Amino acid sequence: MLKAAGAAGAGIGAGLGTTALATPASAADAPFAHPGLLHTRTDLDRMAAKVKAGARPYAARFAKLTANRHAQSGRQANPQATVYRGSGSPQNYAALYNDIHAAYQNALRYHVSGEDAHADTAVAILNAWSGKLTSIQGSADRFLAAGLYGYQFANAAELVRDHGDFDLGRARELLSDVFLPLSDDFLRHHNNAVVTNYWPNWDLTALACVLATGIFCDDRAVVERAVEYFKHGEGMGSVRHAIPVVHDDGLAEWVEAGRDQGHALLGVGLMGTVCEMAWNQGIDLYGYDDSRFLKGAEYVAKWSLGGDVPYTANTRKKGAIGGWSGSETATDAAGVDPAMTRPIWAMIANHYTKRRGLSASYLTRAAAKAAPEGGGGDYGPNSGGYDQLGFGTLAFTRGRVSAEGARPQGAVRASASPSAGAASPSAGAASPSAGAGRDLAATGVEGGVGWVAAAGVAAVGGGVLMLRRRGGAG
């Protein structure tokens, strides 16, 4: 169905040794790092220190959070026993996503400001839902609800898991017994449809929930299922199906660009969420398959900014197993509205340009245009405005880090042998001082001069790195 093409040697990040990191047998029983979903202790401490010091522009970004109506202490939860999305009565899933975003925003505000009232509010909301919600029902959209709100609930809960009043056991049960089964089943059976019936964002919502639940509940088998699906899953959300074609210029087609802009942005944001949560546990999915996600994210960023991108026609089969069947062909990238944005770019751009020291000009331009990123409630009243937790320019802006900081920092740190001719993992990292203190979202450009000199870059242009192999012919 999908044309798969390997990257030529002139792709983004080629030769950086960014191979997948497998879990070594010696680390199989190592505990997961907590907090360790979208935010680590280092991330939270950085945000708090920058805001306390009044550092620009962190204070302005924090003001974006404090202005959101969901981030106010004292909010009363509206828990439901059964949540319906798509069909059934009442259509009440908005109560769930509004409360989850309120819990997350209050928890994040607590970590930055130290105000206990916000932690107490987050705990009260999460406890109310874990004490009442027993089922998610509806049309096929119930899988979207389980995936989106499952990974978001886990992230909000992760920020208050050590609070004295937080019912950790009940939160684990809610994730394991209500959210996870639907997401896990979708990745296995795809609602009894042919595997290509659903576009990538469906798989990626489920994948984010499975991974977040596994980490939150310290269930290594669940985490391993999620990682394996990202790499080799049969559905359209696995990395080679979501990004089926890599061009010689280093850009890689995001297959859902043939559908529409909104869903493509959603998919990129969800894949970035999966990569970030994995990274914080020592698993490098950002760099998997020669940084395939970077190439796909750059493609979507360029396209969303109004740039011309290639698109290889593909046909996907549709229908139910043993029932109706059909097919659909996408022949070109859909039209875009350059004003459309989602709070997805800061996290991805900061990973590749700051942690890895790579140039990614389309990502940095998109991040700059979206800054300062808000969260749920800042992007309209409908559910699409709540698909990402947001506030990325506050949470993920960082200076360039050392070679050590360019590796996953979780409890499980494994290394695979670089591919033939690849540079050492540290070759792609800038020196600690390179670009230190610069603000990716404020400037929108990061040339990576220090890294370019170190890694041996033959040319930089159009957001693509053209690399030569160090110390070898050709």
Image: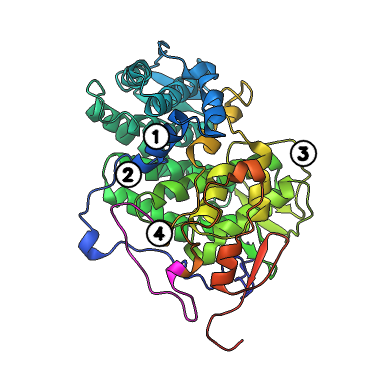
Q: Which residue was labeled with disc 3?
A: 337
Residues in magenta? 408-426
- Magenta stretch encompasses residue 422: yes
Mark 3 closeness class: few <14, some 14–19, many ≥20 residues within 10 Å: few
User: What secondary structure characterizes most of the magenta part?
Assistant: loop
Mark 4 closeness class: few <14, some 14–19, many ≥20 residues within 10 Å: many
**Residue 195: x and y, percent?**
53, 52
Disc 4, SS: loop
Outermost residue toward the bottom in this view:
473
Q: Which mark is residue 214?
A: 2
Closest to the camera, between mark 3 and mark 2, is: 3
Is residue 193 at all visible to an observer of this figure? Answer: no
Question: How far apart in space, not on screen, are marks 3 and 1 (Cα)?
Answer: 30 Å
**Residue 408: x and y, percent?**
38, 56
Q: Residue drawn 48% across and 22% down? A: 84
- Magenta stretch encompasses residue 63: no
Picture quadrant of residue 106? top left
Amino acid type, residue under disc 2 in the picture: Gly
In the rendered structure, which disc, 3 or 4, sits on the residue that comes first in sequence?
Answer: 3
Q: Are marks 3 and 4 in contact (CB under 8 Å)?
A: no
Q: Which residue was labeled with disc 4?
A: 407
**Residue 467: x and y, percent?**
61, 73
Q: Which residue was labeled with disc 1?
A: 155
Question: How far apart in space, not on screen, are marks 4 and 2 (Cα)?
Answer: 21 Å
Question: How far apart in space, not on screen, are marks 1 and 2 (Cα)?
Answer: 12 Å
Position of residue 219 relative to residue 391, above or below, is below
Position of residue 90 relative to residue 17, above or below, is above
In the rendered structure, which disc, 4 or 1, sits on the residue that comes first in sequence?
Answer: 1
Mark 2 closeness class: few <14, some 14–19, many ≥20 residues within 10 Å: many
Horizontal side of residue 235 vs 184, given as left or right: right
